[in-house]
Structures are given as structure tokens and as C-alpha cells.
Image (cartoon, rainbow, N blue to C red):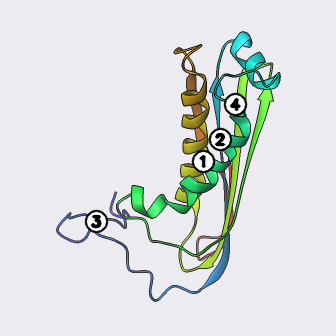
Amino acid sequence: MANLTHFDGKGDAHMVDVSDKDVTSRIAVASGAVRMLPETLALVTEGTAKKGDVLGVARLAGIMGAKKCAELIPLCHPLPITKVAVELTPDAALPGIRIEATVKTTGQTGVEMEALTAVSTAALTVYDMLKAVEKTMQITDLKVVLKDGGKSGRFEA
């Protein structure tokens, strides 16, 4: 617990000072899923959901979520994001939608939170667009699967 960087010596939350960190290329990939009934998934894959293109809208929402991360998570640094890619893949075996977000920057701190926010926002959008037909959907398995760049190096789940 002594290595928690978001707390000062008194135990108060604070934004980490990254001004002395090197500017490096950084990438993070996060993933998650929205589990649903096969009948609900069919609405997505057949393009018959009443609110429209579920995957297209959720992809845009995920991109927007990554860009708004510093406004949503109190101690995140606003970052110059250079890339956000959000992939939503229907999976009949789940059943549901698998979501993966890749975020890149060149900066002094990583983009894990931005990738997680992208997946979360995309998943919430899928739920919002389909909740009229299924309220029992579950948003699951949110995690960082890759982080690279900076002093701590590469992490792969």
C-alpha cells in the first residue's frame, strides 16, 4: 500500500506530478463484454434493434469516452490522445458483444484509464440501446490486457 501514488504523505488524494517523467510512446488495450440473451444478440447482428446501429453507436461512444476520461476520473491527467480504436464483436458463444479498445499517446503517463473508459462507455451504450428488450444484460470482464511504454515497461495479461 505504500506505493499508492495518488496519496500524499498525509494520506490525502492528489494528482501525481508527472513533470519529471520522460515523454514516451504509450499504448494500452482494455477489454470487456456485454452478456445478453441469444434473442437480444440477434437484434444486433440482424440490424433490427429499434434504436439503430448498436455497434456503430457504441464504437463512437467508446471513442468519446476515452477522450473524456480526465473529466470523469478525478485524478487522471488530460492527455493528448493520438489514437483510439474500439472493436465490438458479436459472439454467439458468450452470448453477447466482446469489446476491445486500444488507446495510444506520446506523453508522460499511460493510457490505461482511457482504454478502460472506452470499453466501459461502449458497453454502457450497448446496454442503453438494448435495455428495452432485455434488462438482465451484464457488463463483465472489464480489464487491461496490454500496457506498454514508460518506466514500468510492458504488461500483458
| SS type, badge 1 | helix
Residue type, label 1: Ala
Residue 146 visible in the displayed image = yes
- Measure how far apart labels 3 and 2 are at the Cα level: 34 Å
**Toward the viewer: 144 or 46?**
46
Q: CA distance from mark 2 to mark 4?
A: 11 Å
Q: How far is the residue under mark 4 from the one under mark 1?
A: 14 Å
For this orientation, the residue located farthest to the left is 10
The amino acid sitting under disc 3 is Phe
Q: Which mark is residue 58?
A: 2
The disc placed on residue 52 is 4
Question: What is the three-letter code of the residue carrying label 4?
Answer: Gly
Residue marked by disc 3: 7
Q: Nearer the viewer, mark 3 or mark 4?
A: 4
Residue located at (54% from left, 35% from top):
124
Q: Tell me which corner region of the image, top left, top right, bottom left or bottom right, holds residue 54.
A: top right
Q: Residue at x 65, y 81 (%)?
A: 24
Are the residues at dot 4 and dot 1 in contact (C-beta closer than 8 Å)? Answer: no
Q: Is residue 148 visible?
A: no
**Foreground of the two, 147 or 62:** 62
Mark 3 or mark 2: whose residue is earlier in sequence? 3
Numbered-mark total:
4
Mark 2 residue type: Ala
Mark 4, residues whose alpha carbon is within 10 Å: few (<14), some, or many (≥20)?
some
How far, Cα to Cα, is label 3 from label 4? 44 Å
Can you say whether 150 is above or below 114 in the image? below
Classify 10 Å Cα crowding around label 2: few (below 14), some (14-19), many (20 and above).
many
Q: Position of residue 55 (x, y in %)?
A: 72, 37
Q: Quadrant of the N terminus?
A: bottom left
Depth-wise, is mark 1 or mark 3 nearer the camera? 1
Give the mark, 2 or 4, whose residue is nearer the N terminus: 4
Q: Which residue is mark 1?
A: 61
